[in-house]
């Protein structure tokens, strides 16, 4: 499929503007040849108007209809074949094989939401049957369910050109909820975005979805995003990226006349606690950790950026083993110039903080955009005293925090900002001795892991990917897994409606045979 | 029980400051004799420190333990006897009988949350069982449940000294969730607050709850609230009151280094659509509507402030009937001077808007704080053109919006800001002809009602009390009913933990016998 460089505005492809942008191949540091038209003011307005119009009919579609749409998107993405994988690889510097897996994750995610829609219970139907005989006041009949919020703007992620981007988890869950979507294409993967957007457009056409259920716009830096977030027709925003970027969007959204929710998944350093017996006797652990730190050039939000352990001769040997593994890790291209420069600056900044000692710094050419891994160490007291060391260094970097004893480990945990994940490595059930440490960790993270690395976020029913601030802007929601759909809905209660005028999910006899709550009792009544 | 004027700081009662405030009896416009000590900086700090400390143990208590605490609070409130009702009446100008009902609502609410805790399924346990054999990657074991956010600050409501105040729905649901609570006492009912706070303190002592699980502070205007909202230890805020007050708190909370959720229930004008056949033939409707508009001197957030109908001779007769009922309505004291003055100003402002015609303005003395009911009318086109007419006039005031036809009714609905409720009165199933009107109404409200008045908010499982902005700051949550508990929790996923170290709600074999989701399937597995 040839790249056209056009904006996808509902069922149309538009390129009215003269201004163009290009994607860059980070491996060669050269622009790819295709030019992408920056959306004009009129094209942005058309996308917004269509999105609002499409929402009014799309929100009324049945779960089966929306499921068909999501499955069609998955099929069209698969139909793009190798061209999609090659383009994503060229725009990201990541190997082709990575996109085999990421494409699988993306289409499975779409199909999982289709399953959820077909099953139907996600609307949380909750019926309280009226009782005219109740005294002193008759009991009204009240029946509640979730309804879609409205048009959603999706900011795509640099580090997952497929799974967290154009047809990624945010778009899939917003479309599943019954919201229309406008994607702001990521400057780093404009071609990948166009290919996937065309797949969604084709799927919308084939399944008779309303014109405007999906749009995707190219834009320059901050301007396009700002216009979209400030528009009164937009009812929610998702973002995956830096704390600075996420908070800028959050601020814009809160300053609107009618504030809207922003689901920003931002920085996290994902503390990993290495209990003494694990340091002593888990000999595979250094390789496991270095694998997690350097995988994907460390460009994962769940990258373990902090290793917390108690000083001991065993820890010295453990650090030696880490260094050994690091030196074998290799050096790979980062996603784009800005990520590369931020990584180099962040790493240099961390290494320059008081008390920080470089344990292993992999060298490499300075004239390309490769992320050279590094590991450093610092005492717990220096770490606790210096919140600069809690800034995420996005890339293959990790800091060993050395504690005097287990109570200082707890102090380090207590000093931490909110995190996506917290991990404990324990041998021989040693963790059972430290329930208050676990409880402090749980209080600061969205996911608490034992003896597995935090990277690799399973897409399923029970995943929580979102933690206390600044890990995400709203810790009550997840951006990965089935419950991501809950970000785009609100409850509406119907009081005293006749059965025939109620939505099917709330009707007597449960015609959708979904899981409901009736008079406070759970069950399929 | 004598009023002491002290601040309740956990299990202590403190009065270290010299500054005092008094409550005023709105019926006499005179200060009541008791003096209440304004919390000193040190007392505020103690309340915050205790609240954080208490949270760490309180969040670990079982559902049964917290249920016992909530039931004890209800019992202690009942034990206060008539003294509580008399004090609430003196501080609000509302009749004693009203507080019989409001006390019942308050204690039933506490007991309902106790039921929910004892049943236990509210934690939304969600298990995804691991599978080491899955290819290409083993499936991790992930189990998710809701955990408490942390200390919550509750701003109490002027119009419900019991049910939305010290031990009202916000406090009850936050305590149920496992959060500690700090109440900012309302200046209008300081004595009522102290009595109820003492009841909570006694209940905490009797059920061995940690010192600091509950505090209640007296303060001057904005200062105390600001200090509490800005404190990093506070993790959520609830507010019931004006748009201006709610947004000021929202802004403070968003400007914090770590923003926190604010659940502000603010202004609503609760549109009521009168379909032609109801205007024509529901002869009880004028009395029903006037009853709802004037009940409690109109001081309810669900007061019907907008009556939308199609011009016709029948509507003229309907308005005459409304006027007749209004003239019988009587004149009663409002809650406090500020509410009285805001009502008079809001009413005058509405009556002075272009095209607004006074239909019925009940006269009365201007030197007391009685709320004199008024009803006005305006054409749909003037209403749509003038958003000033969407400002809530808190008190017994309603505006009839006269439309040319049903499509203009829909235009009026489309022009509305978010609302707590929207109501339709229909005879002979006329509403069945107007599905797009219903759909536009649903899109703007939290609760959609047929043939019942919006006042009288049932406390139960299916209630939704919260609507799109500006009705509330977060339409995804309710401040009334069982689901109010969801405001104070976030999900945490446990990955790869042995059964013995998991919270009971997530353990194999379901030892709490709660309703759970397992591998995506609902049921008590």
Image (tube, coloured by chain):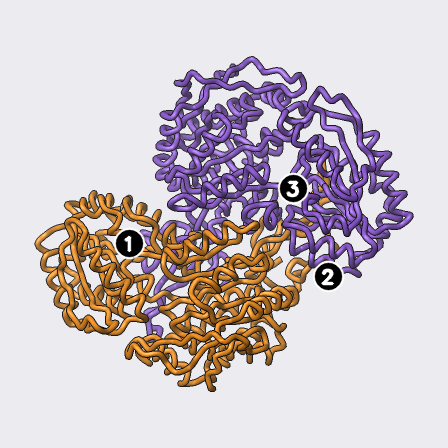
Chain colours: A orange, B purple
Left or right of A382 in this view: B38: right
Left or right of B158 in this view: A401: left
Q: Which residue is at a point 74% across and 61% down the rendered structure image? A: B435
Q: Is residue A112 above or below residue B126?
A: below
Are the residues flagged by discs 1 and 3 from a single subunit? no
Q: Which residue is at a point 24% across and 43% down the rendered structure image? A: A411
Residue beneath disc 3 = B458
**Local SS, label 1:** loop
Q: Position of residue A370 (x, y in %)?
A: 24, 72
Q: Mark 3 or mark 2: which is in front?
A: 2
Q: Position of residue A15 (x, y in %)?
A: 53, 77
Query: Outermost residue toward the front?
Result: A18
Residue beneath disc 1 = A391
Q: Position of residue A352 (x, y in %)?
A: 17, 54
Front-lying residue, B419 or A5: A5
How many marks overall? 3
Q: Which residue is at a point 30% across and 75% down the rendered structure image? A: A26
Instruction: Decide: few, some or many residues near mark 3? Use Cα within 10 Å; few <14, some 14-19, many ≥20.
Output: some
- Give how far apart the Cα atoms at labels 1 and 3 are: 47 Å
Instruction: Decide: few, some or many residues near mark 1? Use Cα within 10 Å; few <14, some 14-19, many ≥20.
Output: some
The earlier-in-sequence mark between 3 and 2 is: 2
Residue beneath disc 2 = B436
Left or right of A336 in this view: B209: right
């Amino acid at each position: 499929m040839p790249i056209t460089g056009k904006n996808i505005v509902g069922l149309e492809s538009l390129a009215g503007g003269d201004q163009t942008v290009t994607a860059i191949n980070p491996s060669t540091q050269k622009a790819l040849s295709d030019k992408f038209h920056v959306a004009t003011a009129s094209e942005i307005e058309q996308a917004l108007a269509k999105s609002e119009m499409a929402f009014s009919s799309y929100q009324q579609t049945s779960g089966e209809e929306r499921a068909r749409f999501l499955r069609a998107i998955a099929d069209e993405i698969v139909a793009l074949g190798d061209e999609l994988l090659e383009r994503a690889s060229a725009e990201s510097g990541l190997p082709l094989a990575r996109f085999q897996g990421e494409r699988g994750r993306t289409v499975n995610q779409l199909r999982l939401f289709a399953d959820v829609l077909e099953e139907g219970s996600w609307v949380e139907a909750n019926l309280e049957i009226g009782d005219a005989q109740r005294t002193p006041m008759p009991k009204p009949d009240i029946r509640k369910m979730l309804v879609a919020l409205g048009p959603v703007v999706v900011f795509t992620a640099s580090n997952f050109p497929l799974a967290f981007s154009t047809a990624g988890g945010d778009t899939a869950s917003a479309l599943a909820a019954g919201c229309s979507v406008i994607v702001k294409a990521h400057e780093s993967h404009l071609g990948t975005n166009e290919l996937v957007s065309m797949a969604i457009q084709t799927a919308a056409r084939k399944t008779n979805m309303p014109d405007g259920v999906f749009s995707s716009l190219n834009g320059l830096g901050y301007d396009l995003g700002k216009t979209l977030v400030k528009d009164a027709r937009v009812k929610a925003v998702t973002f995956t990226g830096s704390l600075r970027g996420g908070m800028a969007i959050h601020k814009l959204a809160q300053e609107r006349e009618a504030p809207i929710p922003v689901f920003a998944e931002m920085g996290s350093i994902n503390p990993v606690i290495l209990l003494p017996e694990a340091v002593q006797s888990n000999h595979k652990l250094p390789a496991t950790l270095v694998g997690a730190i350097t995988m994907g050039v460390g460009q994962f939000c769940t990258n373990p950026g902090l290793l917390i352990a108690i000083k001991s001769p065993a820890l010295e040997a453990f650090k030696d083993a880490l260094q050994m593994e690091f030196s074998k890790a290799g050096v790979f291209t980062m996603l784009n110039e800005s990520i590369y420069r931020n990584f180099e600056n962040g790493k240099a900044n961390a290494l320059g903080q008081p008390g920080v000692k470089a344990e292993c710094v992999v060298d490499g050419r300075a004239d390309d955009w490769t992320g050279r891994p590094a590991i450093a160490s610092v005492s717990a007291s220096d770490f606790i005293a210096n919140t600069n060391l809690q800034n995420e260094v996005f890339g293959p970097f990790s800091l060993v925090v050395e504690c005097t004893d287990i109570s200082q480990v707890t102090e380090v945990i207590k000093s931490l900002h909110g995190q996506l994940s917290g991990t404990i490595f324990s041998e021989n059930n040693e963790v059972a001795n430290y329930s208050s440490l676990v409880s402090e960790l749980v209080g600061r993270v969205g996911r608490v892991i034992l003896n597995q690395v935090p990277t690799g976020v399973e897409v399923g029913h029970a995943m929580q990917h979102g933690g206390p601030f600044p890990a995400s802007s709203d810790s009550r929601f997840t951006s990965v897994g089935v419950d991501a759909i809950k970000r785009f809905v609100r409850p509406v209660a119907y009081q005293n409606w006749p059965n025939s005028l109620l939505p099917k999910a709330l009707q007597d006899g449960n015609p959708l045979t979904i899981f409901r709550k009736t008079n406070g009792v759970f069950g399929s009544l």
